[in-house]
Amino acid sequence: MSEHDTRDCIFCKIVKREVPTPLEYEDDHVVAFKDINPQAPVHFLVIPKKHIPKIGDLTEEDRGLLDQMTSAAKHLAQKLGIDETGYRLVINSGDNGGQTVYHLHVHVLGGRFMRWPPG
Ligand code: AMP
Ligand code: ZN
């Protein structure tokens, strides 16, 4: 499957409600839901409704989208009560970046201390 083929994209299926997944947040441009394989006590993914494979595929047309994603992450962190203790936003990009799902997403990780550097 090509990165640009939306038909078999699991996150597109979540956006289209073809794979039932409770949404923690939704607006016109993004949705957020729990990561299926959490790496922290709180682990959510914020994704654009539009299929964009990775950060390098953002175009002029997508101006403002990263802002909408981080705004949603901020809103989510407040809602989940991790804004005071802190949290980490992560975007993995490409194979060396550890990206496994080629539909742009921001990880929101919290509820424990995050080590640095990441593995
Ligand atoms: P990345 O490795 O940055 O591409 O992250 C992809 C994330 O998507 C991983 O943390 C997976 O656990 C998560 N994931 C994959 N499929 C699903 C799904 N159906 N629902 C929720 N999270 C998923
Ligand atoms: Zn997609």
Image (cartoon, helix red, strand yellow):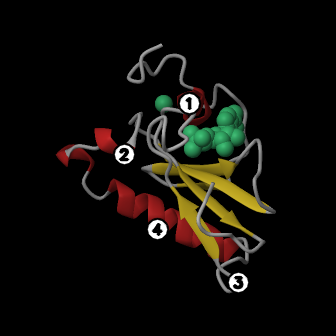
Q: Which mark is residue 71?
A: 4
> Which residue lies at the image location 69% right of the left edge and 70% below the top edge?
114
Q: Nearer the viewer, mark 1 or mark 3?
A: 3
Query: Quick one: SS at disc 4?
Result: helix
Q: What residue would you read off at disc 2? A: 55
Q: Which residue is labeled 1 in the image?
A: 16
In what element is the residue under mark 1? loop
| Residue 36 image-quadrant placement | top right
Cα distance in 3D space between marks 2 and 1: 21 Å
Q: Which mark is residue 70?
A: none
Question: What's the residue type where badge 2 is placed?
Answer: Ile
Q: Secondary structure at mark 2?
A: helix
Do residues under tags 3 and 4 come within 8 Å of each other at their CB atoms?
no
Mark 3 or mark 4: whose residue is earlier in sequence: 4
The residue furthest bottom is: 84
Could you tell me the amino acid type at mark 1?
A: Lys
